[in-house]
Amino acid sequence: MADTVLSIAKSLVGSAVSKVASVAADKMVLLLGVQKEIWFIKDELQTIQAFLMAAEPSKKSILLKVWVQQVRDLSYDIEDCLDEFTVHVSSQTLSRQLMKLKDRHRIAIQIRNLRTRIEEVSTRNIRYNLIENDLTCTTTDERNLFMEDIRNQSANNIEEADLVGFSGPKRELLDLIDVHANDGPTKVVCVVGMGGLGKTTIARKIYESKEDIAKNFSCCAWITVSQSFVRVELLKDLMVKLFGEEVLKKRLRELEGKVPQVDDLASYLRTELNERRYFVVLDDVWSTDSWKWINSIAFPRNNNKGSRVIVTTRDVGLAKECTSELLIYQLKPLEISYAKELLLRKANKTTEDMESDKKMSDIITKIVKKCGYLPLAILTIGGVLATKEIREWETFYSQIPSELESNPNLEAMRRIVTLSYNYLPSHLKQCFLYLSIFPEDFEINRNRLVNRWMAEGFIKARVNMTIEDVGKSYFKELINRSMIQPSRAGIRGEFQSCRVHDIMRDITISISREENFVFLPRGTDYEAVQGNTRHIAFQESKYCSKISFDWSIIRSLTMFAERPVELEHSVCSSQLRMLRVLDLTDAQFTITQNDVNNIVLLCHLKYLRIARYNNASYIYSLPKSIGRLDGLQTLDLDSTNISTLPTQITKLRSLRSLRCMKQYDFSSLTTCLTNTFCLPMIFTPSVSTSDRAEKIANLHLATKSFRSKSNGVKVPKGICRLRDLQILGVVDIRRTSSRVIKELGQLSKLRKLYVVTKGSTKLKCEILYTAIQKLYSLQSLHMDAVGCTGIGTLECLDSVSSPPPLLRTLKLNGSLEELPNWIERLTHLRKFYLLRTKLKEGKTMLILGALPNLMLLHFCHNAYLGEKLVFKTGAFPNLRTLVTFNLDQQRDIRFEDGSSPQLEKIEIGRCRLESGIIGIIHLPRLKEISVQYKGKVAMLAQLEGEVNAHPNRPVLRMAMDRSDHDLAGDAKGSPP
């Protein structure tokens, strides 16, 4: 009997196992089926993207345009489906894949629907024969007609613009061209600027100058190159302009009726020009290849008659290929007074009209600013204003963005701006349209932008370049092409931020909306939004109560204003399930802990950036569910109350940037403790949601975060698993275990590290320095020994024997007294910030002065205790900027002959220079001396005289009234 029962039991177990195996097999078959479908839609996406690139010419029929939009929307949906598959299936372990049958089934249905849509879109093309009839219809002739319309518009404005604000630039350009030098090799001069700035205008005025050009050159030619040109036809045009039509006819007859080839015409041109002094303008050159071809085949190499070639272009990079930087003329926008004068002239008004009407004066100022002081924009809009009453001008100003889309009188201006966009390479088009997310006049940080581009998948990797460096090259290329305006440069002259020209931005927004790329809710225009727009940015503070919008397909959400009504319960609701980028840096509301708890549930998130609002942060912890964000690349939490990172942070293998700076304001400790005793009251109905969030955050600050007493966070074990991490901060060394500190040395790709060592043991500091020596990719290191309880020491720095070889930026904050010897081996160091280091006179300036690439030296808060700051002969060969702030002992700054030959700026604040600044005559490149708050200088009048007499014409800037900075008459400050 027992044997029978045992046999039956074995049979039942065997049957159950068999059923489990059968179910697993069925699931595996389904998984393989989904995988095949994924391969199919990946191929379709690649084909679709190739089609979209081919469908970019500026003129497309309305029918084709609609079809292209449908194909683009389909590509968006395919990308979403692939993202879903990556997150829910392919990235999971086999056991989890078998468990996630529901997700696989949902994705399989999506793929099936996408297949059907692909077939429908393809059938639609066949039905209307779209590609054959329209995609290839944009011929060279049509493009040239498009260009000719723009060229005529520009030419029509020449006489009007001459006139206002161009005499100065014309004179400067003539000086650069140097038309009277009648010998020497051919000189190429480039005029660079964005479309509509007047490059063609100023070049034309010089070309038509009889006194300057006709008298000094034996032959001249004006050639419009533009985007597309036929090589033989360009050479024919050049020959006619230089030598006359009869010469061309004769040359064609000599070819005995053959079809002229490039070499037939080019050899004749080079021979004839070799002994002549010629002046040629190549207007509107778009590509380096075009310039190289024309220069190599049409112009002789050995002409020494002082010939001149003028090139106008929108591309700074191209200009640098044409000639040296000294021969590049950057045309600037009109000065505001000239811009107003030009607008009034075009609008048939006078200065007296404007001066008599204050309201009119204000609106004119707004309009010329909106035009970016571009002559073409001012003339075009001025022409429209001439047809309107003055009382209508303000209304027109507010409607300029929509007028650009619909008013035929503004079509020429729209075209000339759109032309630059149309000519962008495909990889830059999305990057450029993405800029429309940011508000008008907003300064866009380069690194922030590049990290967002990376998260969106806009950047394509290149061999031997990090993806960040590729992104920076995209940013630089947009600047070079005059698509964006650089606004802030680093010490090396590398642009670190940009702005978008107002008119350019308005047209970019128009293109973005047309392509369902970015939507910017404004006022009551929510109904204008298309259901498949992928990026949304809230820039205004007023919102409608309801937006008819599919939040589930949004890929990026950016906040510059208050919390939208639609997301009032959480800034990141479950509706935003496909979100890749969440940027709350400039949000005009405080992010709560509940918000963060919901945000980390968004499994597609790749970029998350949050900053505190109004100096308040209600975020006190990162939830453990942060570990589910497998694709997260950037996590930037600026000034929160987080004191410890959870262990789950080590699961984020894609993480490249991790910034978590803890704020500490211990003056509120009493309030925090009071909240502890009032805990039951926090949850009563009388307390609002925002007040409750604040009180709970303060409670956590009192009970947990307060103990850290630094602006760093405790880092968990396993941080070494983040192999792609390039930025890490701020690490609290005191509260982080020795084992984890040792792990930092395994982050081989780390470029930037920010640590706080206040209160750390000597052993932990030594372990830290040993780890830092292993970071061969490290370029920026910030070490802070200052905390809420005072200034700590940067002890044990002498124990470093081999500093990171590529270190470019070093910031030391804490007592040091003597610079360690290894500092002198930092041959790549460019920026050195010293705060509270209490360095003594002696070898300090000797070590610093020997650093060959040091460009920025910053002494702050008694970083240097010597009375004299002496820059000796031969020292500081590359120093560009010197900052001294709050140095109690400092009495003078002295420059010896041959010291600091590259120094451009000296900045002084909270110092008493009783012996003044001595030896500025030895600084040949000096541009500015800035005396900041509580900066006092002896013999200020003498310094002013030396500045005025300096051959480089530097400026002396004072933050306050002159008497506030002058030590003259002050008994304590009288010079010895």
Image: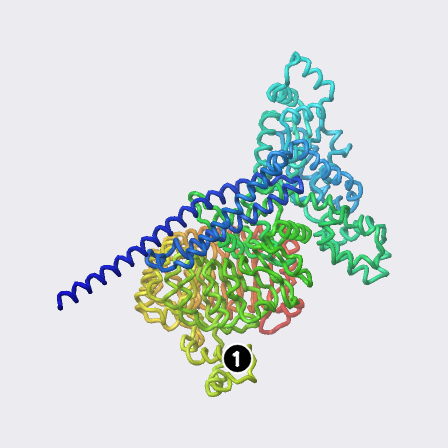
Q: Position of residue 350 (x, y in %)?
A: 85, 53
- Across and down, in percent, residue 59 comes to 66, 39
Q: Secondary structure at mark 1?
A: helix
Spot the residue most to the bottom.
677
Crowding around mark 1 (Cα neighbors within 10 Å: few <14, some 14 to 19, many 20+) is some
Instruction: List the residue tagged with mark 1.
Output: 692
Let me know if residue 398 appears in the view: yes
Residue 751 spot, x, y in % from top left: 42, 55
Above or below, 841 against 688 in this view is above
Q: Residue furthest top?
A: 256
Looking at the figure, which quarter contains the N terminus? bottom left
Nearest the viewer among 262 and 594 is 594
Above or below, 221 against 440 in this view is above
In this view, the residue in front, 82 or 360, is 82
- On screen, residue 757 versus residue 877, left or right, reads left
Q: Is residue 410 above or below residue 188?
A: below
Residue 125 position by quadrant? top right
The C terminus sits in image quarter = bottom right
Depth check, front residue: 696 or 926: 696
Residue 303 shown left or right of residue 871 in the figure: right
Q: Quadrant of residue 177?
A: top right
Q: Which residue is drawn at the image coordinates 43% and 47% (left, top)?
A: 37
Coloration mode: rainbow
**Residue ID at (75%, 55%):** 367
Q: Residue at x 31, y 67 (%)?
A: 738
Task: Give the amino acid type for the residue marked by disc 1 in the picture.
Answer: Arg
Above or below for 672 versus 426: below
Q: Is residue 824 visible?
A: no
